[in-house]
Image: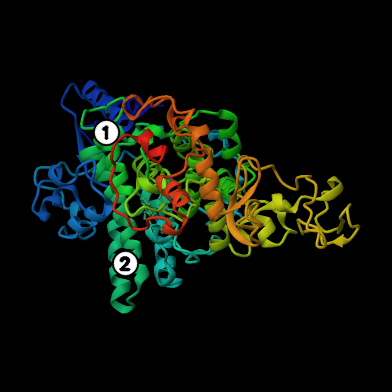
Amino acid sequence: MSAADALRQLSQHLEICQVFVFQEVCSEELQLEAEMEVALREVTGGAGQVVRCWGYTLHHIDDLEACGKAPERWITPYLSFGNFKRDIAACKVRPVNAEWKLPEGHLQLTKPPASGVEWGSLPSLPDLGFDESFVSDGERSAVPWRGGESFALARVQQYIWERRGLKQYVGTTDWSAGGKCGAPRDQTSKLSPYLAFGCVSPRLLYWEIQRFEKSDRCKGARGLINSLLWRDFYRFIVHFAWGDRLFHLYGPMSCGSVPGGHKVPTKWCCKHYNNLFGGSDPRLWTWKKDLAKFERWAEGRTGYPFVDAAMLELKETGYMLHLNRETVGWFFMRDLQLDWRLAAEWFESRLLDHDCVLNWGNWAYFILTQLPSREDDRPGGGPRYTLPRYSPYLMASQVLGWGRDHDPDARYVKKWIPSLQSLPPELCREPWKADLTDATDDAESDWTCAACTLQNLAQTRRCEACLARRPCASLYVAPLVPPPPEQLGLCGSCGAMEVNGWESEEAIFFCEDCWAQWLASQVQVNMAQVTGTASDLDPDAGWALVPELAPTASAVAAAAAPDRGPRKGARWAVRGNRSDKLAGG
Ligand SMILES: Cc1cc2nc3c(=O)[nH]c(=O)nc-3n(C[C@H](O)[C@H](O)[C@H](O)COP(=O)(O)OP(=O)(O)OC[C@H]3O[C@@H](n4cnc5c(N)ncnc54)[C@H](O)[C@@H]3O)c2cc1C
């Protein structure tokens, strides 16, 4: 039943004069509000009033001018979180309950009539299509979630005061720092569903944190307030600047200032992406809608256990840690190269803490903006994270790295994928390395190399005598995208041993120097695939316009003069035509 219809029914029992709502900012919610307003006018003969109150945020919208400028002037589509945080520091957080002093002339709320009203009943979980175990499974779920204000306040009390959880809090901005957080450790507040549903106010949380800080100053307290500021950032920027552009394929920042957005983002906007985030132009990316790949991602069957564990947790419990949301998001966009909005929709349908602006905002600001860049396309010259130069293996290597950092003993992975229980952590993260001979599924039993008949440990991937790889019989789901190549190996060109490098498409391993030379030798071949210049880029053709193994300008330069090495720290500038650049011209 829609809110408007519910209001119509209620009006048969109650005399309705005013309806109070939290002011919404996204179009679907605004539409619901408008429908309810029409219904209210209908049942009250035009006298009824919808009173929109500002809620959900730490700072009140009316206080934003305290920083000296009208919010419309400083909350623009290109505002970064850092600048938002700096400017909003001038605005005070109101005390809790401030709005409860109703202004003069407002109607006082009366109690609902005790009898004669059919209040209906709340649907049960099975009515809504969920299993009862969806939230009651305390053992698998991050928290045994229980809805309502009392449980929300109890959680605040328990987290801040009883567990003193702020002492080890690690927030959004710090997640990707190596080794700071353990996926199975309970280092965050787990208050998001309560905040999303308004069971607890961010202001109450803020003042509780302040109270805690008086007795025990700690970095975690600042960290949690910082996380609450992210909520403000998204709600205010959607309200004042992004609007429906939040749902645009190229993101809210790349559609120019036209309401609804340009179909093709302006050159300036794309450049802005580069400047602000160091990512590449979203027009150049392939935004596929491959549903088979999407399903494997959503069902937790990508073959990358760290990704799969997180997706299974989301599916079964409706919750996922922030780091994991980032990991699976980047994997989705960069490795699977799918339209990020499919994933955001999936999150929307599963997350217990779903909040339209936070979910779509994080996808647009955190995930979309991290498109990998070609080495020379970003400030400072190097990739944002330590990707091998223009690697075709985009996130996969980082997914493995994060698994190592945040789940070193693979406890989290094993919890969600029990079939990997018996493997040591490294193989648990990369089960394709544990291919078993003779198609046996038994990870415990030893195997024998056919060439030298030596008995080897079941978990080793190469024969311990001759280093021959074991034949493949997958222990786990085959990886959906190729696993990153090994980092250490024997260079197939110069013969150097145990060196860093990458594997070519023909599976030849090259050390760094030879890789650059090999890439240079590929230029002529690959350039044949480029069909167009920067001026006639077709966004639909997307990433395919950039040849897959295109070397960066510096790789070509390094190949020409190997002793010069790559230009680290060079100032970024876009000069000339992109296809010239690809050719190293
Ligand atoms: C792709 C993606 C989608 C997301 N979708 C949602 C969503 O629908 N609803 C939601 O509440 N959070 C969302 N987040 C933000 C964040 O992951 C969750 O808020 C957090 O994991 C909730 O756990 P917690 O309560 O223990 O967080 P804590 O770390 O304890 O943070 C406290 C509160 O601060 C807020 N917060 C923390 N990080 C962020 C952030 N990056 N952006 C906005 N608010 C933040 C949340 O309300 C959170 O409850 C998303 C993040 C990503 C990367």
Is 474 above or below relative to 116?
below
- Does mark 1 have its CB less than 8 Å from ligand 1? no
Q: Tell me the SS state at disc 1.
A: helix
What is the three-letter code of the residue carrying label 1?
Answer: Lys
Residue 218 in which image quadrant = bottom left
> Could you tell whether 331 is left or right of 97 in the image?
right
Question: How far from the left and from the top, in percent, is residue 440?
Answer: 85, 48
Say which label, 1 or 2, has the lower sequence index.
Answer: 2
> Could you tell whether 259 is left or right of 429 in the image?
left
- Does mark 2 have its CB less than 8 Å from ligand 1? no
Q: Residue 450 or 157: which is nearer the viewer?
A: 450
Is 533 above or below relative to 226?
above
Residue 412 in which image quadrant = bottom right
Do we see residue 356 in this rendering?
A: yes
What is the three-letter code of the residue carrying label 2?
Answer: Arg
Is 243 above or below relative to 137?
above
Q: Which numbered marker is on residue 473?
A: none
Question: How far from the left and from the top, in percent, is residue 290?
Answer: 55, 29
Name the residue beneath numbered marker 2.
Answer: 222
Q: Residue 344 or 276: which is nearer the viewer?
A: 276
Name the residue beneath numbered marker 1.
Answer: 267
Question: How far from the left and from the top, in percent, is residue 472?
Answer: 78, 45
Q: Residue lying furthest right in this view?
A: 453
Q: Which quadrant does the N terminus fall into?
A: top left
Q: Which quadrant does the C terminus fall into?
A: top left
Residue drawn 35% across the image and 35% down it:
578
Packing grade of label 1 (10 A; few <14, some 14-19, many >=20) is: some
Q: Mark 1 or mark 2, which is nearer to you?
A: 1
Q: Residue 208 or 98: which is nearer the viewer?
A: 208
Packing grade of label 2 (10 A; few <14, some 14-19, many >=20) is: some
Mark pair 1, 2: CA separation: 38 Å
Question: How far from the left and from the top, in percent, is residue 426?
Answer: 66, 60
